[in-house]
Image (cartoon, grey):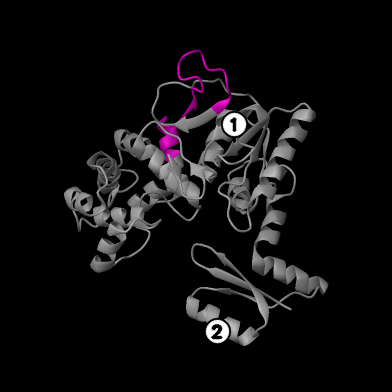
Amino acid sequence: MKSVGEVMGIGRTTEESLQKALRMVDPSIKGYYPKYKFTMEELKQELAVPTDRRIYAIAQAMYEKTMTVEEIHDITKIDHWFLRRCEAIVKTWDKMSGSSLESISGDLMLEAKKNGFSDIQIAEAVGSHEDDVRNQRVNAGITPFTKQIDTLAAEFPADTNYLYMTYHGMENDVDSSNGGVIVLGSGAYRIGSSIEFDWCAVSAIRALRGMGYKATMVNYNPETVSTDYDECDRLYFEELSKERVLDIYNQDKSDGVVVSVGGQIPNGLAIPLDKAGVKILGTSAQMIDNAEDRKKFSSALDEIGVQQPRWSELTSTKAAFEFAKDVGYPGKILILSHVYTMQLIFSLT
C-alpha cells in the first residue's frame, strides 16, 4: 500500500499494509487511529473533502462510534470493502482496550499483529510498555516471518532478495543470513531528509560489500536507489522502528547496525536500539544523541565557546510567534515539526 510522502507498506492484508504505511509517513504516527480531535461539523467536512487528514477522520468516526460504516460511505463514497477493513482494525483494538497485558490471550495477540498493530499500539491499548509487550509475544512464539516478494508474477521461481516481514504465514521464505551489517535508510523524503541521505546509505552499502561484508538495507521509500534490490545482499522493504529493526537484527543474527547515514529517522533510533542491546557501528549512539538533541548540542557549543544563533524549543504556536517577535526581522526561519514540539531556529542576516 503506497501512502503520502512516497512510502510503501507491504503486507498480506489491507489491515496490515495500511497500518504499516501510516507509520512509515512519520514516526509520530502510531498507525490507524484518530490523530486529530475533530468536532462533528469538522469531522463531516474532513470526510467530505479528500485531504491527507481524511484517513484520521474515518478513524475517529470508527473509534468513537459516532458514525456507522454506511454513514461514512455515504459521505466519502469509499467502497464498503475498504471501510470494513478499517473497521476490522478498530474491532481488534476494542477487544484489547481496557484489559491488561497479562490477560491478553495468544490468539488475540496474534490477531493484533496480523492486523498491523505495533507493540507500541498494543501497549497503549492495555496500559503497558512496548518492551513488555515484545517480551510477552516473543516468549509466546509470536514473531514475524520473512517473506520474499515475487517479482516474476509466479511465472518463474523468484530469486531476488526483495523481502518484507509479516505475521501471516507459517515459515520464512529465506534462511537467516547468519551475520552481515544492517544499514538503515532515510525513510520518507521531507525537508531536512532527502536524496543526500540515500546517497550516504548506498555509499555505505557499497563500501561494506567492497570490504567483503554482507550488507542488508532496511528502508521503505520506493523512490530511492537504496531500495533497488541489486544494491545489497538483502533488502527489507520495512518500517524504520525499534521493533522492526530488532526483528531483523535477531532473526538474521546481524553483526551490527549502521544508523548514522540515513538522516533523522534512523538517528532517532540510535539510543533505543543501543539500550536494546543492538551493536551500533560507527558513531556511537550517545554521540549521535548529543548532536541530534538541540539542547545538548547547544550546551556543547556554549561549553567550548562557539557562537550560535538564538533558538528556542517551543510547544505552541503562540510561543513560536512570541519568540519570532522577540528575535525580530529580517531573518531566515526554519521550522522543524515534531510530535509535541516546534523548534524554531533563527539565523539573522
Please say whether residue 312 is visible from this viewpoint.
Answer: yes
Q: Nearer the viewer, residue 104 or 19?
A: 19
The residue under the point 70% across, 38% down is: 202
Q: Quadrant of residue 218?
A: top right
Q: Kindly tell me whether residue 232 is visible in this rendering.
A: no
Is the residue marked by circle 1 packed among few (<14), some (14-19), or many (20+) residues within 10 Å? Answer: many
Q: Residue at x 54, y 78 (%)?
A: 320
- What is the residue that sits farthest to the top in this orientation? 156
Spot occupied by residue 126 in the image (x, y as percentages of width and height): 33, 50
Q: Is residue 246 above or below residue 293?
A: above
Residue 308 shown in magenta: no
Q: For residue 14, which numbered disc appears in the image?
A: none
- Mark 2 or mark 1: which comes first in sequence? 1
SS state under label 2: helix
**Looking at the picture, which amino acid does disc 1 mark?**
Leu
Which residue lies at the image location 49% right of the left edge and 80% below the top edge? 318
Q: Is residue 147 above or below residue 50?
A: above
Q: Which residues are magenta?
A: 135-162
Residue picked out by circle 2:
322
Q: Quadrant of residue 174?
A: top right
Q: Which image quarter holds the N terminus?
A: top left
Quadrant containing the C terminus is: bottom right
Q: Position of residue 176 (x, y in %)?
A: 58, 23
- The reply, left or right, for residue 13 in relation to residue 159 is left
Question: Toward the viewer: 143 or 232?
Answer: 232
Please identify the quarter of the rendering in which residue 343 is found: bottom right
Q: Give, as a three-letter code, the residue at label 2.
A: Glu
Q: Position of residue 344 (x, y in %)?
A: 60, 72
Which residue in the protein does label 1 denote?
A: 235
Q: What secondary structure is the stretch in magenta mostly built from?
A: loop
